[in-house]
Amino acid sequence: MPFVEDLAPFFDPAEFGTAALYDGASSPIYGIFDNAHYAPFQEVDDVAPRFICASSAVPGVVADKALVINSVSYKVKSIQSDGTGVLELFLEKQ
């Protein structure tokens, strides 16, 4: 029998989760928004916005769709699954 975990507490907006609207939907999905700076090389400083959420929150998610977080529009650039039911959506600010 496969292991099933309720991931909602990890993305609870009352704690540390953030609401987002995927592809013009009227109902929000909840996840963790990370817009931290990183410097892969000493000479380069970049921002890598990403949204981490339960894969069940966005079934059929595809790249190049819009994700609106805190009234800012992003485009999903790539999607990475960790194999446990969690997706990492790498974003580009529009």
Image (tube, rainbow, N blue to C red):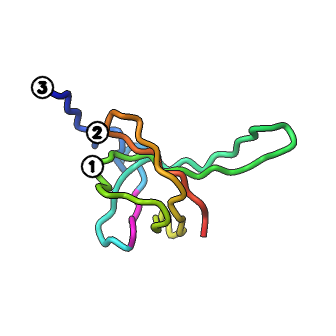
Residue drawn at point x = 27 percent, y = 49 percent: 56
Residue occupying image coordinates x 37% and y 58%: 61
Q: Looking at the image, is 81 positioned above or below residue 92?
A: above
Q: Quadrant of residue 93?
A: bottom right
Viewer-proximal residue, 69 or 91?
Answer: 91
Asked if the residue under mark 1 is in contact with the one under mark 2, i.e. CB atoms within 8 Å, the reply is yes
Vertical arrangement, residue 66 with respect to residue 50, above or below? below
Q: Earlier in the sequence, mark 2 or mark 3?
A: 3
For label 3, the crowd category at 10 Å Cα-Cα, with few meaning under 14, some 14 to 19 and many 20 or more, is: few
Left or right? Give the position of 58 relative to 4.
right
Task: Label 2, secondary structure: give it.
Answer: loop
Judged left or right of residue 47, residue 61 is left
Between tags 2 and 3, which lies in front? Answer: 3
Q: Is residue 48 left or right of residue 29?
A: right
The magenta stretch is 19-23
Instruction: Name the amino acid, label 2.
Output: Leu
Q: Main secondary structure of the magenta part?
A: strand
Q: What amino acid type is highlighted by mark number 3? A: Met
Q: Which residue is mark 1?
A: 56
Identify the residue position indicated by label 2 in the image: 7
Q: Nearer the viewer, mark 2 or mark 1?
A: 1
The CA span between labels 3 and 1 is 19 Å
Decide: few, some or many residues near mark 1? Use Cα within 10 Å; few <14, some 14-19, many ≥20.
Answer: few
Up the image or down, 22 lies above or below 51; here it is: below
93 and 81: which one is in front?
Answer: 81
Q: Is residue 22 magenta?
A: yes
> Which mark is first along the chain, 1 or 2?
2
Residue, x 59% and y 52% (percent of image)?
49
**The label number, if any, that marks residue 1 in the structure image:** 3
Amino acid carrying label 1: it is: Ser
Q: Position of residue 78 (x, y in %)?
A: 51, 53
Q: Are marks 2 and 3 in contact (CB under 8 Å)?
A: no
